[in-house]
Image (cartoon, helix red, strand yellow):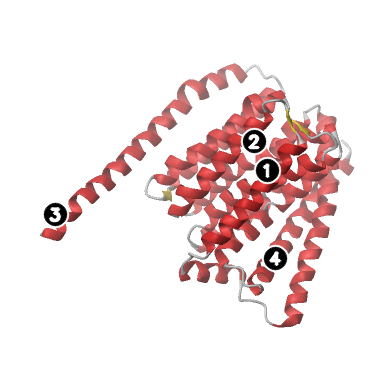
Amino acid sequence: MDWTMILMLLGGLAALTLGAEVLVRGAARLAAALGISPLVIGLTVVAFGTSSPELAVSVQAAWSGEAGADIAIGNVVGSNIFNVLLILGLSAVVAPLIVSQQLVRVDVPIMIGVSLLFALMASDGKVDRLDGLLLFSGLIAYTAFAIHQGRKESKAVEAEYAQEFGEKPRGIGQIMLNLAFVVGGLVMLMLGSNWFVDGAIALARAFGVSELVIGLTIVAGGTSLPEVATSVMASLKGERDIAVGNVVGSNIFNLLSVLGLAALVAPDGVNVAPAAFDFDIPVMITVAVACLPIFFTGYTIARWEGFVFLGYYAAYTAYLLLAANQHDALPMFSNVMLYFVIPLTALTIGVTVYQSWRARHTATASAPTDRMG
């Protein structure tokens, strides 16, 4: 094994992680200094900032040509699956998560809609530059919408983000310092993305694994480390729904900005491998849709639901590895998942949603009687 590729992967990952952290901190404080609301900072600057490694890696991969296209697509799709199943799962296991009604009613449906739009664009085997322009325009519209929603935020949310990112910077010196953080973070992201993509492609070729599988696993997991750190730390601190909002916002950003810009800079658009369209993209959409009933049950993600998420991510990764090696256990594994595990999970979630709806309906129906009594 060539240890150079391992060093490139590790060095690139370190630069990506540190660069994202520096960029998020500097950008959040700058936004606060400019009077941008804390809720908008959370849904845009923080969520988008933690997705900056995905942006750097995917754009660099798409720019490198056909070999990097699978890395770019795999990174976006794999990161969105990773964010929901592993990050939310892990955060919920640490402590049950509270989900705001706005996320259930607005942001999660937007995430589902954008996922379906991406699948429609990819149906011809390519996300071309016109598709990329449409996706990136969607990001501008979503940001404008987030600013509009941010005017309605509560003092509790303001205090929450102030605790996470500190007070507004005061004085020109502090503003220049945070501007330097933003520039320094961007430089580290660019360097880290170059090293990481080159190392990932070399590793895939050395082991005979496709660039798509590497993108869906190593690259997706590596570039999602900022989301892991942000969401798990928010869960540990007991901070309302930062963990959930960060994941949902990051998934929207991955599709609208990361994929949009990758398609714009790629010489001939971004090709979508048949394997990704037939399996991984449907998994991404299914995971996004599954958030609605799970989030709806009491507007919380319970620990058992977190374990379900983690179990499904382990199963998804196992399937990718078995399929990549054409292992003899693949048919049996697929049948067990398709005919037993998935139906059982769907039934459990369905019963839980029904019980939650019934409890609310009963409480609503009995409320006038209680007031009369």
Location of residue 22 in the rendering, given as x and y in whole percent from the top left corner: 73, 64
Which is in the foreground here, disc 2 or disc 1?
1
Q: Which mark is residue 38?
A: none
Determine the residue positioned at 73% across, 43% down.
133
Is residue 200 shown above or below 98?
above
Location of residue 113 in the rendering, given as x and y in whole percent from the top left corner: 56, 39
Discs 2, 1 touching: Cβ within 8 Å: yes
Q: In screen coordinates, is 83 left or right of 200?
A: left
Q: Amino acid at mark 3?
A: Thr
Crowding around mark 2 (Cα neighbors within 10 Å: few <14, some 14 to 19, many 20+) is many
Q: Secondary structure at mark 2?
A: helix
Q: CA distance from mark 1 to mark 3?
A: 51 Å
Q: CA distance from mark 1 to mark 4?
A: 23 Å
Determine the residue positioned at 42% across, 40% down.
293
Discs 4, 3 touching: Cβ within 8 Å: no
Q: Amino acid at mark 4?
A: Ala
Question: Which quarter of the rendering shows the N terminus?
Answer: top right
Q: Which mark is residue 135?
A: 1
Instruction: In the displayed orientation, state which residue is furthest to the bottom.
Output: 171
Q: Residue 343, located in which quarter of the rendered image?
A: top left
Q: CA distance from mark 4 to mark 3?
A: 52 Å
| Label 1 vs 4, first from the N-terminus | 4
Determine the residue positioned at 64% across, 47% down.
138
Q: Amino acid at mark 2?
A: Phe
Query: What residue is shown with label 3?
Result: 369
* Number of numbered labels in the structure image: 4
Query: What residue is shown with label 4?
Result: 27
